[in-house]
């Protein structure tokens, strides 16, 4: 198992367009680190630098205590699995998996043993004599993983390997990759733009945006304590609601005042936020922390009119509009009698709110 350390890596395209900016990251030995972010955030560039396929403009890369920044890719003992799998179409599955071992001039017996063991672990023994064009996308993905496994690399690098699969197969393959990583005890870095994939796979998540690390933490930390508004909005489906407003102290109370409604902070929370009195802020609240009430209430509620109802089986996604024209989303039970254009109130759980600096880039004030 190998520990990876990245120190202040930066990379520009054409020396002008930043792809990565001062990225520092440590991946522990045997850890599954997921790098997630929107398209163009620098995820694949970072993976290619670790693999040695690209060189950083500044910064350094270490495997354990060894500086690998200028080491050739073939000397890094890294296996990279791409989105398309990149199998050789004229070779059988067996020969595809054996190819990197033949390049090392290993004996036939050693190659056969390594291929058999990998195929058994991936449940593809019956595919060994078939050609890639006869396989499903999921089977080709397993073969690509098997070809990486037989090399016994120090580090596995996976670049969106499940992007072309349907939803059911992606879910199954995620479980298999997680199980495989545990059984191998391998250091693995997995790149994806899918926040659900990141949450379900990772020991820890590194969130990238525009080449800058936004936050590093466990899935639970990322979800419950987002470092800024971008991270809060990127994770969660439906995504977090954001409401612009101000912090106001009135007598012994600390309030969030906005055009949609007013929220009274609990005492413990008020101690944290009262220093922002009279400041413009953004309140974030996840849809699952908003409750629809049909009876009149004055406590932490926003009057709304229901705009749409999306049935998802065990829950209904409700999109509503406040009297000030602000769209808000919450979740409801399918048994709750709701109709389009119905006037209701959304009750906010004040213990679950997040408070951010004003603007699209605002850092979290309550982490």
Image (tube, rainbow, N blue to C red):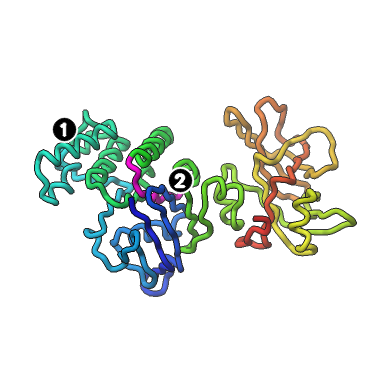
Neighbor class of circle 1 (other Cα within 10 Å; few <14, some 14-19, many 20+) is: few
Examine the rendering and report whether any part of residue 261 can be seen.
no
- Going 65% across and 39% down the picture, which residue do you hit? 288
Farthest residue to the right: give it.
Answer: 251
Q: Nearer the viewer, residue 182 or 78?
A: 182
Picture quarter with the C terminus = bottom right
Farthest residue to the bottom: give it.
Answer: 15
**In the rendered structure, are the residues bearing label 1 and label 2 in contact, judged by CB atoms less than 8 Å apart?**
no
- The relative height of residue 59 versus residue 151 in the rendered view (above or below) is below
Q: Is residue 191 magenta?
A: yes
* Left or right placement of residue 132 versus residue 310 in this view: left
- Going 61% across and 34% down the picture, which residue do you hit? 310
Q: Is residue 111 magenta?
A: no
Question: Which element carries disc 1, helix, strand or loop?
Answer: loop
Residue 267 in the image: state x and y as whole percent: 80, 50
* Left or right placement of residue 234 versus residue 275 in this view: left
Disc marking residue 129: 1
Q: Nearer the viewer, residue 132 or 102?
A: 102
Residue 149 in the image: state x and y as whole percent: 26, 43
Residue 92 in the image: state x and y as whole percent: 16, 38
Q: Which secondary structure is most common in the magenta stretch?
A: strand
> Which one is earlier in the sequence, the residue at label 1 or at label 2?
1
* Left or right placement of residue 334 versus residue 62 in this view: right
Q: Which residue is mark 2?
A: 202
Neighbor class of circle 2 (other Cα within 10 Å; few <14, some 14-19, many 20+) is: many
Q: Nearer the viewer, residue 202 or 30?
A: 30
- Going 61% across and 51% down the picture, which residue do you hit? 225
Give the magenta-colored segment's residue range.
Answer: 184-193
């Amino acid at each position: 198992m190998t520990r990876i350390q990245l120190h202040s890596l930066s990379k520009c395209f054409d020396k002008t367009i930043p792809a990565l900016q001062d990225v520092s990251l440590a991946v522990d030995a045997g850890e599954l680190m997921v790098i997630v972010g929107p398209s163009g955030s620098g995820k694949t560039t970072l993976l290619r630098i670790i693999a040695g396929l690209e060189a950083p403009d500044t910064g350094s890369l270490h495997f354990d205590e060894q500086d690998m920044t200028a080491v050739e890719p073939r000397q890094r003992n890294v296996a990279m699995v791409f989105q398309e799998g990149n199998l050789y179409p004229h070779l059988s599955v067996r020969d595809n998996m054996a190819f990197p071992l033949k390049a090392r001039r290993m004996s036939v017996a050693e190659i056969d043993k390594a291929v058999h063991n990998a195929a058994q672990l991936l449940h593809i023994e019956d595919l060994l004599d078939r050609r890639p064009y006869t396989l499903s996308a999921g089977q080709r993905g397993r073969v690509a993983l098997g070809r990486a496994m037989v090399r016994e690399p120090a580090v596995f690098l996976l670049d969106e390997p499940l992007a072309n699969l349907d939803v059911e197969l992606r879910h199954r393959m995620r479980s298999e990759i997680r199980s495989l990583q545990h059984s191998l005890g391998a250091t693995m870095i997995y790149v994806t733009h899918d926040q659900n994939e990141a949450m379900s796979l990772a020991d820890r998540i590194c969130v990238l945006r525009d080449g800058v690390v936004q936050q590093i933490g466990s899935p639970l930390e990322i979800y419950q304590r987002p470092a800024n508004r971008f991270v809060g909005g990127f994770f969660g489906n439906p995504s977090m609601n954001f409401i612009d407003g101000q912090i106001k102290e009135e007598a012994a109370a600390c309030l969030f005042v906005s055009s949609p409604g007013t929220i009274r902070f609990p005492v413990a929370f008020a101690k944290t936020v009262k220093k922002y009195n009279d400041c413009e802020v953004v309140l974030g609240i996840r849809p699952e922390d908003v409750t629809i009430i049909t009876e009149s209430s004055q406590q932490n509620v926003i009057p709304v009119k229901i705009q749409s109802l999306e049935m998802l089986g065990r829950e209904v996604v409700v999109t509503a509009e406040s009297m000030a024209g602000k769209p808000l989303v919450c979740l409801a039970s399918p048994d709750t009698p709701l109709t389009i254009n119905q006037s209701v109130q959304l009750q906010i759980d004040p213990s679950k709110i997040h408070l951010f600096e004003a603007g699209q880039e605002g850092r979290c004030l309550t982490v």
